[in-house]
Image (tube, coloured by chain):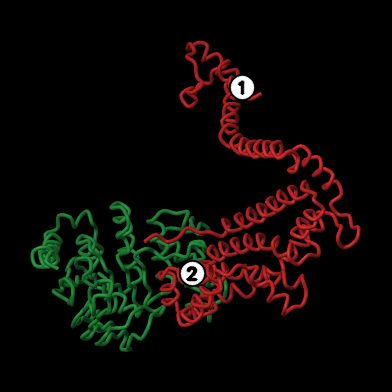
Amino acid sequence: MVSAVFHAPLDSQPDNVKTIADCALPVSGTAQKHLKTTSAQPPRRRVALARRFWSTVLPPLLGLALLVGLWALVAASTGGSIPTPHATWLQALEVFADPFYRNGPNDQGVGWNILASLQRVAVGFGLAALVGIPAGFVIGRFAFLARMFNPLISLLRPVSPLAWLPIGLLVFKGASPAAIWTIFICSIWPMVINTAAGVQRVPQDYLNVARVLQLSEWKVLTTILFPSVLPYMLTGVRLAVGTAWLVIVAAEMLTGGVGIGFWVWDEWNNLNVKNILIAIFVIGIVGLLLELALVKLATAFTFEEVKS
Amino acid sequence: MNMSTHPSLSSKFIEIQGVEQTFRTAKGVFPALKDVNLTIAKGEFVALIGHSGCGKSTLLNLIAGLTEPTSGALLCANKEIKGPGPERAVVFQNHSLLPWLTCEGNVHLAVERVFGAKESRQQLRARTDAALALVGLTHAGQKRPGEISGGMKQRVGIARALSMEPQVLLMDEPFGALDALTRARLQDELLDIVARTHSTVVMVTHDVDEAVLLSDRIVMLTNGPAATVGEVLRVDLPRPRSRVELAEDARYVNCRKAVIDFLHARQGHVEKAA
């Protein structure tokens, strides 16, 4: 099919042959004139389509093929302890045929597990945003507070989120709140740091405009600081969601209950490797979707900066 | 001829008395301005000219109130300048429009701040529209700064400043970043606007032709550090001025020569030594 599309322009030469010189053949003037009136447009469009296919669709498909190929090789060489892509695919069809079943607390559909994880991430991340973004604004706006909190942030930020889990278990005395606490503590830093950096980098020109106009502190916040910081803030949010999604799997493995991380651990105990592989793909795809949604949001709110 | 050529009517609108400005830098204290004395009349157009780094913008920022002098005093309408305010509107060198607001929104922000307390919504709208019309940008009102050219941005900046009906218009190399043709057109527009609004204008520039064409007086600053007023040249050219006719006018040529002489013959070498 690919070759058919690719060779199409050779049969009927459109008049802008120069732009597709790679696949052009010399055609006599009369033939060209004749063909131009009859069928110049469709092949041109087909050439464009073929090009787009080669440059945008094919490379990622090849990448995926490489992954599946390597996987199949590993599966074959380990003699069946790692299931083949085909077997995993069949299992996935079965798992996703009924994602929302419930046979007791330890046996629920993959849909419930994903939703449970997403809910924990949403709560933990939401709380972190609620605290972290205003904190970032305040730290960015007042140099004194920045100097006060910077050592604390530098000290706590590199701590692995899982190190906070026992503290959460101790204080909240429950698995789910402890997981949420872990999400909170790991996703708050990127938001605080990026928001503060954004506030500190508000161009002095905008602040001078505010000073000349003698805008009120509230007006400065809403018309100058907030829109100017928004792109930085959204970068922080994106990093935070990414981290939160990384951490939730690990946290749930330790705390149990329901959730995609718990599901992975449960399937390991059942020695159901196919489901573990499916879980890996599901985690990846959900993370990718979260990231894409936030990138889309961020680009919608990014404005041209003043160039001095 | 308008009142701008009669500065004697109210000869002390802006007063700069013995102003000194020093900056603390990593290398120690840097004296930027020293012993600057200048008075500007109401309705007068004054250009501040000098080599780059001589403290022109520093002086303008002091008049704007964006910075405070190390010593000395600045007065506007017999009141000490204590901080920036809408009665001393600034046209910034890099336009400083807020990129998330439309052109109209940018002007409206200023209009709302200055007149919002006592005028109706329609009146504020009318003022915004009038300011954009003054610079010939009615059609671009709904566009964001990122979507228009550099010259148009600068015009929006001027519209924003004028919309506040300021007592003084402070311009920091407003046309410095523009190409020669756009700059010439905006200078003509500015001449026209100033003639209509009788604004008091202080403009920082490093363009000799711009200074002679636009101003009533040209204040020439000596080279820094510790720059001060070196010479003040009165430009006695009748208004309205036309750049085409002036090009061959002997008075224009003399003024131009005087400024160039100051900048290059008397102040040119100091900069190289510094």
| Mark 1 or mark 2: whose residue is earlier in sequence | 1
Q: Which chain is green?
A: B
Kindly identify which residue carries mark 1.
A3
Does B46 sit left or right of B190 as displayed?
A: left
Identify the colour of chain A in the image.
Answer: red
Label 2 CA crowd tier, 10 Å (few <14, some 14–19, many 20+): some
Does A191 sit left or right of B46 as displayed?
A: right
Q: Please state the horizontal and vertical placement of residue A62, each as a whole percent of the image.
A: 61, 35
In the figure, B142 relative to A58: above or below?
below
User: Which residue is found at the position 24% from the left and 58% from the top?
Assistant: B242
Q: Quadrant of residue A34?
A: top right
Nearer the observer, B263 or B5? B263
Q: Which mark is residue A197?
A: 2
Q: Quadrant of residue B22?
A: bottom left
Nearer the observer, B84 or B273? B273
In the figure, A45 relative to A227: above or below?
above
Quadrant containing the C terminus of chain A is bottom left
The chain to which mark 1 is attached is: A
In the figure, B136 relative to B231: above or below?
above
Q: Secondary structure at mark 1?
A: helix
Q: What's the residue type where badge 1 is placed?
A: Ser
Residue B115 seen in render: no
